[in-house]
């Protein structure tokens, strides 16, 4: 490791060159060089967040394949009175013109809907428009005709007769094509031109998806530059150097570029979840850059560039790598059992974090060393933060028990409120109330008693089964039950068609508006009397049917309630009827619930993985748990807040806990790493709390401020769920900051941590377990652990290590160098011995005796120094190592006693 | 690919026609004369097509195999009776199988002011006259409508027919016709393109254009043309609904012409009675 650090410090141009080469490749991956267009795709469909192999999604696709597009584009046009010759003529004209739009497969409206008029002479199947032309006197009956026809009621004309609807089915164009071809604008313009009406509303699944895509793109276009501006401004305020800021901003931009290149290469689309990655990576990388700049420009006298780089790599390596790994662990914890979109989000975020750590750790110091400002920067507020950090450290130490008690009490309270969290989201209400897409949806929803379509597919797997009157009546009862549900606006099935055909073929006699008693008659009516529209509701073999349900609710909670109730009702159907609910709102609701229900597992995994990593790094399970506590608190507070304020857990708010946990643990690690080093250097935990807080408070505060501001940028989004994400994530980050500057120092004040990094880089010379008797019987790792639990000191030649006559309880072990032991005998220096590697000195003091001799460094020396407290701590945390050390100590004492005895004899 | 080739052929035909017209104009110098020549050529083609409908009754045993989007098939068999009375089509189709639909019958009578349709549903034991825009509605859930039956039977009484030129399709020399259905028919198709085999005067391909898109396409199998007596007909054709992804194959299993059948098969009061 040491060699790698030296190599990196010496070859900074190589690091810069490699980063430049990779970045060029990344740029070519993200943008097509020939067209300069981005290679990333946008996917706004919530239902496609479900896995492709998902059973519900497969059913949805199968139903669409069998019965055609179930989510038409709905156009509604306001008239003074639809039932007039002029209005119907305009509707007719608009229907024709809409049908001429490229890609429009079918348009259904009052104009081309057949108005069957049956009498003794036969059936007139002409359309409303044709009848209006031929028999204007019939127009006044149209309202009644529509009201009594369940297929047309609340579908062609609003109940008040002032709004006409047009259902447009488009030929296989996806929502991106729909958006690119600007169908909404074209349809609106055409409707305005033909009808002259200013009351025009357009909605439908594709319309909402197109608007969502626009909102995502707008959010990205707004948030990423806004965060960059914020980053630059913050760094400029913090470090007052344009060059340093430019280089830090470049590092952040490269992290983002690498992440997006990974998305392009892995063909991960930008969807409602992955859209959060770019701003997230930007803010995370900013946090790393702030810590690195703090270390890079820390005051060191006459330090050469290479030495500075080595110091930065050495000091930041542990904390940045650990921070990155724990953040990645937090993200990866989202993956098990989650939806593909969440897994993609986690993977992309992890790649972003890895890129950020790599670039911040390797690239940023290299460019700073080469072309960064040479002078020492004078960071803003340094003195202020030092002063406040000292005050805060005193406060934390004084009120340590209270701080911990409050934190522990807050946990169950938060859990109580968290238990009240509801899972769900509102789709259209995700848009601002002033957004056209929402206003249109709500207008159509109100005028036509529902604007979202849900399908119930009834399967029998038996040819002609659905012509059996017994089964038809059961379907009819199901339909009646559906109509009674408060969420339902309208229900249409082939049973409605069948009843109408029966009535029309029986001279329009209302008594025949019923299901025939004979299966043969049913089949004949369906085959010989059915229009093309019936093919959208029952298959040609009469074994599968579709019940089209128009719902007037938009909240996923209400939809989930309706689906659960309906599924229970469907379970009561007799064989061979077998029915399931499907449709875009159903799948979207299922997606929302899947994402939210994965929270508990994800969080547990995140806590587990981060704890395990901390335990490995700190080589102590207890220390890792203590390090984790300050991060569990903000997460608990976050969920408590959701429950308290009745904010639902949805795909975006559901991501916050894991994201914040991953980020917040960084600050804890920065504090604890510094605390550990300072505690060892100063031989005092209390002093280390102060110095560590002084050292990290400024960067941690700036980082938190940057992250909060970064998250708050999301509040400028058009989508409410992204606004919620931004506000709540900023709030939770703030909580994490408070916990990190109060609870972490309070918990850490009695803690000494040995990091894996420390173990790896500790140099005890050649085979210390074989060359130092006190360490005999230990493994190399155990020897290093013991050394780190002790204090490794360096002394210059001539330094007095032990003074004769002093009371002191430390024991020293010589790691390298030579010590001279001497006594003052009547003013004369009498040298007793020279101690070298492996020698143990000062054990008399350890056993309560005064120092019996002076010990001076004859050469520069490195000594391991420990006392009874260190040994007790070792006994508690590493009992096996302690047992061997105690045994060796006894052996050394025994040998020494034996030698003395032998000398006396 | 096939479609684009057809478009090319169509385009070539159009260009050839324009070229021919230009030459004709230069040669004669009289536009009226050109129009007259066009009309005569068109009438000749249409007359040739109509000549395939026998003056006496022709009976075709037909099989309709409808395939839905999921590949599910439904087979209907029946008899199609057709004749020409005063240059107007009379057609009646009667279902023979499956058994639960047997006996159902449709009668279509072409006339100048809008065609008459009658349906007989055995379960109701009633004949109902159908008026209005039913011409384009599918027959019994297949992809074929009454309007299509008219095309198949070469009857163009309600609409404007233009002869666009000549071309070649699947090894056949063809006339290209454009039919614009009359407004009073309330047809959803604004244009029907026809490729008529020059040798037999039978439509071997048709495209039904709704708005700007080809909604349905009828294609006669390469070896699907048959002749009985002097009359040609398509014995194997497939109608595809390009938007819905469904198709119906129409096969003529047998034909008998010039049978001395009574007019009851085309009488609204009696068409459904007997075999």
Image (cartoon, rainbow, N blue to C red):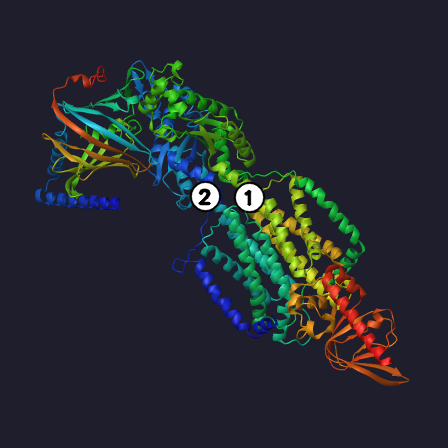
Q: Which residue is mark 2?
A: A53
Residue for badge 1: A595
Q: CA distance from mark 2 to mark 1?
A: 17 Å
Image quadrant holding the C terminus of chain A, namely: bottom right
Query: Is residue A243 positioned above or below A275 on the image?
Result: below
Tell which of A107 and A417 is nearer to you: A417
Residue A143 position, x and y percent, is: 42, 21
Position of A871 compared to A233: left or right? Answer: right
Residue A207 image point, x, y percent: 45, 40
Compared to A823, does B252 lie above or below? above
Label 1 CA crowd tier, 10 Å (few <14, some 14–19, many 20+): many
* Marks 2, 1: nearer the viewer: 2
Q: Is residue B227 above or below residue A225?
A: above
Give the class, few, some or many, for how many residues have Cα within 10 Å of label 2's Cα (few <14, many ≥20): few
Rendering coords of residue A224 (x, y %):
54, 54
Residue at screen point 59% across, 60% down: A232
Indicate left or right for A464 with A223 as reference.
left
Q: Let me know if residue A387 appears in the view.
A: no
């Amino acid at each position: 490791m040491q060699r790698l650090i030296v190599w990196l410090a010496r070859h900074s141009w190589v690091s810069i060159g490699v980063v430049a080469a990779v970045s060029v490749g990344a740029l070519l991956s993200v943008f097509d060089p020939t067209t300069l267009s981005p290679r990333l795709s946008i996917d706004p469909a919530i239902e496609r967040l479900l896995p492709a192999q998902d059973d519900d999604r497969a059913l949805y696709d199968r139903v669409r394949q069998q019965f055609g597009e179930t989510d038409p584009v709905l156009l509604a046009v306001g008239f003074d009175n639809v039932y007039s010759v002029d209005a119907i003529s305009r509707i007719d004209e608009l229907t024709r013109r809409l049908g001429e739009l490229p890609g429009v497969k079918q348009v259904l409206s009052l104009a081309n809907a057949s108005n069957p008029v049956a009498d003794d002479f036969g059936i007139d199947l002409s359309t409303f428009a044709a009848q209006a032309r031929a028999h204007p006197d019939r127009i006044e009956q149209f309202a009644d005709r529509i009201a009594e026809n369940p297929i047309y009621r609340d579908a062609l004309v609003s109940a008040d007769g002032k709004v006409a609807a047009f259902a447009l089915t488009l030929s296989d164009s996806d929502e991106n094509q729909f958006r690119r071809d600007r169908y909404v604008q074209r349809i609106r313009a055409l409707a305005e031109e033909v009808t002259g009406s200013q009351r025009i509303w357009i909605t439908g699944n594709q319309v909402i998806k197109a608007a969502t895509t626009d909102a995502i793109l707008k959010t990205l276009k707004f948030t990423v530059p806004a965060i960059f501006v914020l980053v630059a401004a913050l760094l400029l305020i913090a470090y007052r150097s344009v060059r340093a800021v430019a280089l830090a901003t470049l590092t952040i931009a490269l992290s983002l570029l690498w992440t997006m290149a990974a998305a392009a290469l892995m063909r991960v689309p930008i969807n409602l979840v992955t859209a959060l990655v770019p701003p997230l990576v930007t803010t995370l990388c900013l946090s790393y850059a702030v810590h690195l700049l703090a270390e890079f420009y820390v005051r060191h006298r006459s330090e050469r560039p290479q030495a500075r780089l080595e110091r930065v790599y050495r000091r930041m390596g542990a904390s940045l790598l650990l921070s990155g790994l724990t953040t990645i662990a937090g993200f990866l914890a989202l993956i098990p059992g989650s939806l593909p979109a969440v897994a993609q989000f986690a993977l992309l975020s992890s790649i972003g974090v890895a890129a950020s750590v790599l670039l911040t750790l390797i690239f940023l110091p290299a460019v700073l060393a080469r072309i960064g400002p040479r002078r020492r920067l004078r960071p803003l507020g340094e003195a202020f933060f030092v002063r406040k950090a000292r005050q805060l450290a005193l406060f934390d130490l004084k009120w340590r028990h209270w701080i911990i008690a409050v934190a522990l009490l807050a946990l169950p309270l938060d859990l109580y409120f968290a238990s009240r969290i509801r899972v769900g989201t509102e789709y259209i209400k995700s848009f601002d109330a002033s957004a056209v897409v929402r206003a249109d949806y709500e207008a159509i929803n109100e005028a036509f008693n529902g604007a979202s379509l849900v399908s119930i597919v009834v399967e029998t797997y038996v040819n002609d089964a659905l012509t059996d009157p017994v089964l038809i009546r059961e379907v009819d009862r199901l339909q009646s039950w559906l109509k009674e549900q408060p969420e339902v606006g309208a229900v249409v099935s082939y049973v409605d068609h069948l009843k109408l055909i029966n009535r029309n073929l029986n001279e329009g006699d209302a008594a025949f508006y019923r299901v025939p008693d004979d299966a043969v008659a049913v089949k004949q009516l369906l085959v010989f009397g059915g229009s093309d529209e019936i093919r959208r509701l029952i298959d040609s073999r009469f074994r599968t049917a579709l019940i089209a349900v128009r719902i007037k609710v938009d909240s996923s909670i209400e939809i989930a309630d309706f689906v659960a109730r309906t599924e229970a009702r469907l379970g009561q159907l007799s064989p061979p009827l077998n029915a399931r609910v499907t449709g875009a709102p159903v799948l979207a609701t299922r997606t929302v619930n899947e994402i939210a229900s994965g929270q508990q597992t994800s969080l547990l995994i995140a806590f587990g993985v981060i704890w395990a990593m901390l335990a490995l790094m700190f080589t102590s399970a207890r220390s890792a748990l203590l390090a984790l506590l300050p991060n569990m608190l903000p997460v608990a507070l976050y969920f408590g807040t959701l429950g308290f304020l009745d904010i639902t857990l949805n795909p975006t708010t559901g991501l916050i806990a894991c994201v914040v946990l991953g980020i917040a643990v960084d600050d804890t690690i920065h504090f604890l790493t510094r605390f550990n080093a300072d505690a060892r250097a100063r031989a005092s935990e209390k002093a280390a709390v102060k110095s560590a807080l002084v050292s990290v408070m400024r960067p941690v505060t700036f980082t938190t401020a940057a992250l909060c501001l970064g998250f708050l940028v999301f509040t400028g989004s058009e989508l409410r769920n992204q606004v919620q994400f931004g506000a709540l994530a900023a709030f939770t980050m703030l909580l994490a900051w408070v916990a990190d500057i109060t609870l972490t120092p309070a918990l850490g004040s009695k803690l000494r941590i040995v990091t894996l990094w420390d173990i790896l880089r500790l140099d005890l010379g050649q085979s210390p377990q074989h060359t130092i008797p006190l360490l005999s019987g230990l493994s190399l790792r155990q020897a290093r652990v013991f050394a780190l639990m002790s204090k490794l000191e360096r002394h210059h030649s001539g330094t007095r290590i032990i003074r004769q006559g002093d009371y002191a309880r430390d024991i020293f072990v010589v790691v390298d160098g030579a010590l001279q032991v001497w006594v003052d005998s009547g003013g004369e220096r009498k040298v007793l011995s020279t101690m070298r590697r492996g020698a143990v000195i000062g054990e008399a003091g350890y056993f309560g005796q005064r120092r019996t001799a002076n010990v001076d460094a004859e050469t520069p020396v490195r000594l391991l120094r420990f006392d009874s407290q260190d040994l007790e701590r070792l006994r508690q945390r590493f009992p096996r190592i302690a047992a061997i050390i105690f045994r060796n100590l006894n052996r050394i004492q025994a040998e020494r006693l034996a030698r003395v005895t032998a000398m006396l004899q | 690919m096939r479609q684009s080739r057809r478009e090319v052929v169509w385009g070539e035909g159009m260009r050839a026609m324009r070229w021919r017209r230009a030459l004709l104009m230069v040669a004669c110098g009289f536009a009226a004369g050109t129009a007259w020549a066009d009309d005569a050529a068109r009438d000749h083609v249409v007359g040739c097509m109509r000549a395939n409908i026998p003056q006496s009754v022709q009976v075709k045993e037909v099989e309709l195999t409808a395939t839905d989007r999921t590949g599910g098939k439904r087979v209907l068999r029946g008899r199609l009776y057709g004749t020409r009375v005063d240059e107007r089509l009379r057609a009646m189709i009667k279902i023979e199988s499956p058994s639960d639909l047997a006996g159902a019958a449709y009668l279509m009578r072409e006339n100048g002011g809008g065609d008459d349709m009658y349906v007989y549903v055995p379960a109701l034991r009633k004949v109902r006259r159908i008026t209005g825009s039913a011409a384009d509605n599918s027959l019994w859930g297949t992809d074929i409508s009454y309007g299509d039956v008219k095309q198949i039977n070469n009857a163009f009484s309600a609409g404007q027919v233009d002869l666009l030129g000549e071309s070649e399709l699947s090894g056949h020399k063809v006339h290209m016709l454009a039919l614009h259905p009359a407004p009073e028919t309330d047809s959803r198709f604004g244009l029907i393109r026809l490729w008529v085999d020059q040798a037999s005067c039978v439509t071997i391909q048709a495209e039904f254009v709704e708005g700007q898109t080809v909604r349905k396409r009828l294609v006669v199998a390469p070896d699907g043309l048959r002749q009985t007596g002097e009359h040609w007909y398509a014995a194997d054709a497939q109608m595809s609904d390009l938007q819905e992804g469904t198709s119906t194959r129409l096969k003529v299993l047998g034909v008998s012409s010039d049978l001395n059948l009574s007019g009851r098969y085309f009488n609204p009061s009696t068409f459904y009675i007997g075999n």
